[in-house]
Image (spheres, rainbow, N blue to C red):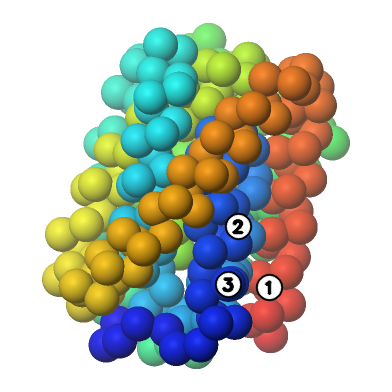
């Protein structure tokens, strides 16, 4: 990113995106597709992935502060090596694609993730991410980990993958949020050297993130307040519905 965005309208869009980042991290993960869309409308699609990363890490810290007692470490340990593989794959793809193709990739990734979520909500017994056999459990973790690593590196869009994996595991909302918080904090930190090496993070990116800290903090507080006022069923429906809206809008913007 060679310079900061110019104009009040662009900054208003970025501020809204930052608020939504905070809400997604501490409340409804399905909302995470919306800031991806907003950033991609203000910035070049490829650069937007790096510009958004510092704000995601900041919001992760709020989520960890709120939900760190509810993390499921065994799930994270199973996913970790496969996420590394997926992240490397995503970095290689980013090296070769141009901005137009990147926008289409972001839209396609979210559309596929949405389709998988909807299919498994309709037929919840068709896929079991936490089966009883060790081989099946490792296979599910491998698939989810590689998919999450690749999609988060290419588009900061691993949220739908993890929503699917954890929701179908039957996680209650606080354990879901705590596990998501630590997962994305670790993954986003791991992505930083790749994003710097690809030229997606710069001093301008970090300055923008610093200027948007109040908006991220506001969103994090809103998300926490709202999530404690909804029950498990409402939480699941809202998370999946927001994933659908975000994915649909991003696909429409890419075609």
Residue 129 visible somewhere in the drawing: no
Q: Nearer the viewer, residue 64 or 196?
A: 64
Provide residue 137's location: percent of width, then percent of height: 46, 21
Q: Which mark is residue 12?
A: 3
Left or right: where does residue 178 sit relative to residue 219? left
* Residue under numbered circle 2: 33
Crowd around label 1: few <14 · some 14–19 · many ≥20 (10 Å): some
Residue 155 visible somewhere in the drawing: yes
The residue depicted at 68 percent of the width and 80 percent of the height is 253
Left or right: where does residue 242 sit relative to residue 130? right
Above-or-below relation of 152 to 98:
above
The residue depicted at 55 percent of the width and 82 percent of the height is 8
Provide residue 120's location: percent of width, then percent of height: 74, 37
**SS for dot 2:** helix
Crowd around label 3: few <14 · some 14–19 · many ≥20 (10 Å): few
Task: Indicate which disc, 3 or 1, sits on the residue closer to the N terminus.
Answer: 3
- The reply to whether callout 1 and callout 2 are in contact (CB within 8 Å) is no
The residue depicted at 35 percent of the width and 16 percent of the height is 73
Provide residue 209's location: percent of width, then percent of height: 34, 61
Task: Indicate which disc, 1 or 2, sits on the residue closer to the N terminus.
Answer: 2
Mark 3–mark 1 distance (CA, rounded to whole Å)? 22 Å
**SS for dot 1:** helix
* Residue under numbered circle 1: 251
Left or right: where does residue 240 sit relative to residue 102? right
Number of the front mark, 1 or 2: 2
Above-or-below relation of 252 to 161:
below
């Amino acid at each position: 990113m060679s310079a900061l965005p110019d104009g009040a309208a662009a900054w208003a869009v970025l501020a809204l995106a930052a608020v939504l980042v905070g809400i997604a991290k501490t409340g409804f993960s399905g909302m995470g597709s919306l800031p991806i869309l907003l950033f991609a409308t203000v910035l070049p699609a490829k650069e937007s992935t790096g510009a958004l990363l510092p704000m995601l890490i900041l919001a992760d810290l709020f989520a960890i502060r709120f939900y760190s007692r509810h993390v499921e470490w065994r799930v994270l340990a199973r996913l970790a090596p496969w996420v590394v593989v997926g992240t490397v794959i995503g970095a290689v793809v980013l090296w070769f694609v141009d901005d137009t193709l990147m926008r289409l990739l972001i839209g396609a990734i979210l559309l596929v993730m949405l389709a998988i979520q909807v299919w498994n909500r309709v037929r919840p017994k068709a896929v079991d991410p936490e089966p009883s056999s060790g081989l099946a459990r490792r296979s599910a973790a491998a698939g989810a980990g590689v998919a999450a690593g690749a999609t988060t590196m290419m588009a900061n869009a691993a949220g739908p993958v993890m929503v699917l994996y954890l929701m179908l595991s039957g996680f209650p909302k606080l354990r879901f949020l705590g596990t998501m918080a630590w997962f994305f904090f670790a993954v986003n930190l791991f992505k930083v050297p790749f994003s710097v090496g690809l030229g997606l993070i710069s001093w301008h990116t970090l300055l923008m993130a610093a200027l948007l800290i109040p908006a991220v903090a506001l969103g994090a507080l809103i998300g926490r307040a709202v999530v404690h006022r909804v029950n498990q069923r409402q939480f699941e429906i809202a998370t999946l519905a927001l994933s659908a809206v975000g994915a649909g809008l991003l696909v429409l913007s890419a075609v």
